[in-house]
Image (cartoon, rainbow, N blue to C red):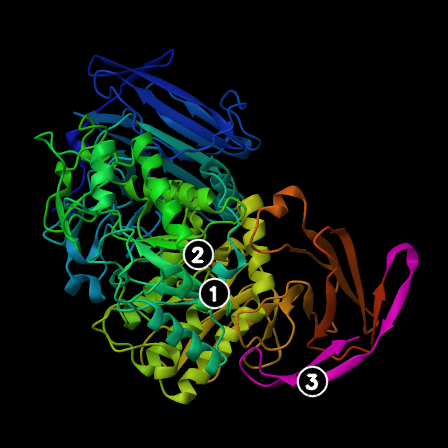
Amino acid sequence: MYLFSKYFNPHNFLFADRCEKGILTVNGESFTLEARAAGEDTYRITVRNPSRWPEDHNRSGLTPDESAHGQKGGISHLEIGRDGGLSLKARMGRTFLGSLPGAAFGVSGKAWMFQFRQRPDMQFYGMGEKSTPFEKSDRAHRFWNADVWADHGTSRAKDQNYDPDYISVPYVIVKRGNTYAGILLDNPHSSVISVSPKLNVANQMMAMSHDKPLFFLGAEDGPPGLYMIYGPTLAQLTMKLQRLLGASPLPPLWALGHHQCRWGYRGARDLEWLADNFDRHEFPNDGLWLDIDYMEGYRVFTFSGEHFADPRTDMEKVQARGYKVVPIIDPGVKKEKGYSVYESGRSADVFCRNSAGSEFTGVVWPGYTVFPDFSLPRTQAWWADLVAGFAAAGPDAAWLDMNDPSTGQVDCNDMLFQEGKAHHGAFHNQYASLMAEATKRGFLKARPDRRPFLLSRSGFTGGQKHSAHWTGDNWSNYHHLHMSIGKTLNLALSGMPFNGPDVPGFGGNAKEGLFIDWYKAGFLFPFLRNHCMRTSRRQEPWVFPKEAMHVVRRFVRLRYKLLPYLYNLFIRNAETGDAILRPLFYDFEDTRKLPLAHVNDQFLVGPWIMQAPFTVEGLTEREVALPAARWWRADHPGWIEGPAKITTRKQQASTPLFIREGALLPMQAGTPRNNRKDLKDIELFICLSRAFHGKAESLYVCDDGESFDYQRGIRSTYGLEASVRWGKLHLRILPESEAFGAVRFTPVTVEKFDGAVLEGPEGSSRTLSPQAFTSDMWGVPATYYAWR
């Protein structure tokens, strides 16, 4: 068991006291320091000493700009002091981040750290997946992928904060006022980011008055390296980070839908039962997921003969109805003579070894289990071939579990890599991402013309290039509901935008109120899946009382109606790195009148939709922060001017939902009642008041949502513009490309304007007439106007 609550202490390190011509000196020992630009306002700092760190096992696949030179960015520059201290300077030479003289870089055996001054105005975010408060001050955080329930215990994981979590991204965002910078620790070993000026003594936080406040980043082994990135805005910082990490590939459209899973779904009968019920209740759903019980004795890449007569034929029955089948894949291979996967792996010599030189053996679902060494190219190829054969048997996608890696009661530290030459810590955090990379290769080999979709429990820096992530085994309670917002936001800010929690919780029993509240909070999260344990009460939507199911269905239908908007957010993220789910201070500045830094129960979906869900059990009213804009309140139709704070009461049928004026939201036409999608028949929701000044602008993009044809230009793109002049709405819908086909737009407004004009090219125009209609698409009935 890892000592998760024990961390480095700078007092046990020796620090560099001199740096001349790129040579750091620590207690007479020499280290080579290199600092250079690695992109726009992005700087790479490495320290090398082959006698301490002879090998670099980092496989994160970062993409620094190799054409960048020197130590200057567009609006910032990096200075190296005579003692090796680092200073990130912004406009006018102001130091945004700086080291303490004589205490910048330190070593202790193979461990190392970089230290920085901690200023009183600093706040900290990011750090990937953490089950700790949204803002990260006053504690140290470890980065070591954990099997949370096994490593922390279910009692602690149920309703307490814990660290570490399933995913490790050692990246910290430093916020000072409304200016931001980020530091990414570029090392896969167990690492620590401490942003606590206090020490923990017997669980009591004690200030050390004789120490100057510092924060540090360090690792237990491996060559020292980090990236420093200057924003200055959080949006700019996030996009620069995403360029460094590599783009998150555009997923298939169906992956953005609703998904249904339960530990206990076994085969064809379960798939058809789910499809029948989703159809019967007119509840949109895309993915039907299978947990470990579909396998033959939990043997990976097998199907139970009891539950599948013919896997391909059985899956095709629900696939023909529009559903996708997503089975689980674990990395562990049953250690059993005669089992083809084990035998082929032995022949190819692809399994991890132990200190004795034989196959490392853990104890997981199949019993005694061996583990592929994904650090080896031959293992990647072997696994990809198995996945390709698996995909050919029918599955549309896969979810990757137990890849932390989980080894049961056996200490994972004896699990060695690189034919036993690399110790466990070199690849522990990278294991899941390397598995996802090999699995993605397999699906592409089976279906080279279809975008693969994988969902992984664990991951590491750069893992978003291969899979989406869910936030692991959570609990059906309000603690986990509330925590899911900050966790998902910080993952997004750390370069993993496609993520989300199990709804309404995996462990325990979801009560009706929690079922409703969690769906209201999460219905627009990037990933939305209902999943629970086999010992939990069933939580398919139709097992709850009819009224509760109807409320949840309304919001899932709204998700499907908004899929064109969500899909365009994913397109923009793939192209620019712009976040999908965002904290309020991503798009709006903190002010004294309306501080946003600690708002951990509101969020933005793209730049236009703000949610303020109820995440505390029994709470009947809550305060909502409205940033500086005019907002249309969808749950209580009307306009509200920000900045302001308002109080809202909880309603069964609705949730506090606000649309920012200026939004031009592409939506599916009508009320979605199944998983069919049409991106070429669009209701354009125009959120403008009669008092709107200026011009609203947007871009709408659509493609087939499945293939890679969009990379070959088969995509339609429209420029959208709207303004209000003398009580009339003026629209421009300008096709930039119709390679995927023409799109039909129906403007819909919340206001009855005095008229509407659709302006065409070269001064042409057409008058549109309003048609009033009543809809509860945003949760409550209201009157809207369609213009034709």
- Hey, what amino acid is under mark 3? Phe
Mark 3 vs 2: CB contact within 8 A: no
To which quarter of the image does residue 2 belong?
top left
Q: For marks 3 and 2, give the one nearer the viewer.
A: 2
Instruction: Specify few, some or many for label 3: CA neighbours under 10 Å numbering under 14, 14-19, or 20 or more.
Output: few
Judged from this view, the residue extending furthest toward the bottom is: 546
Task: Give residue 348's position: percent from left, percent from top.
Answer: 25, 32
Q: Is residue 513 above or below residue 759?
A: below
- Hey, what amino acid is under mark 2? Asp
Q: Kindly identify the residue that appears in the image at 37 percent across and 47 percent down.
A: 389
In the rendered structure, which segment of residues is drawn in magenta?
A: 760-788
Task: Give residue 51's position: percent from left, percent from top.
Answer: 21, 16
State which tag comes first along the sequence, 2 or 1: 1
Q: For marks 1 and 3, give the one nearer the viewer.
A: 1
The Cα atoms of the two marked residues, 1 and 3, are separated by 35 Å
Q: Kindly identify the residue that appears in the image at 33 percent across and 68 percent down.
A: 481
The Cα atoms of the two marked residues, 3 and 2, are separated by 39 Å
Mark 2 vs 1: CB contact within 8 A: yes
Q: Is residue 239 above or below residue 426?
A: below
Disc 3: which residue: 773
Q: Is residue 200 left or right of residue 273?
A: left
Q: Nearer the viewer, residue 92 or 277?
A: 277
Judged from this view, the residue extending furthest toward the right is: 763
The Cα atoms of the two marked residues, 2 and 1, are separated by 9 Å
Q: Is residue 736 left or right of residue 103?
A: right
- Hey, what amino acid is under mark 1? Gln
Task: Give residue 544's position: percent from left, percent from top.
Answer: 35, 84
Disc 2: which residue: 396
Disc 1: which residue: 319
Residue 294 visible in the picture: yes
For the residue labelled by badge 3, is the local secondary structure a helix, a strand or a loop?
A: strand
Q: Nearer the viewer, residue 453 or 26?
A: 453
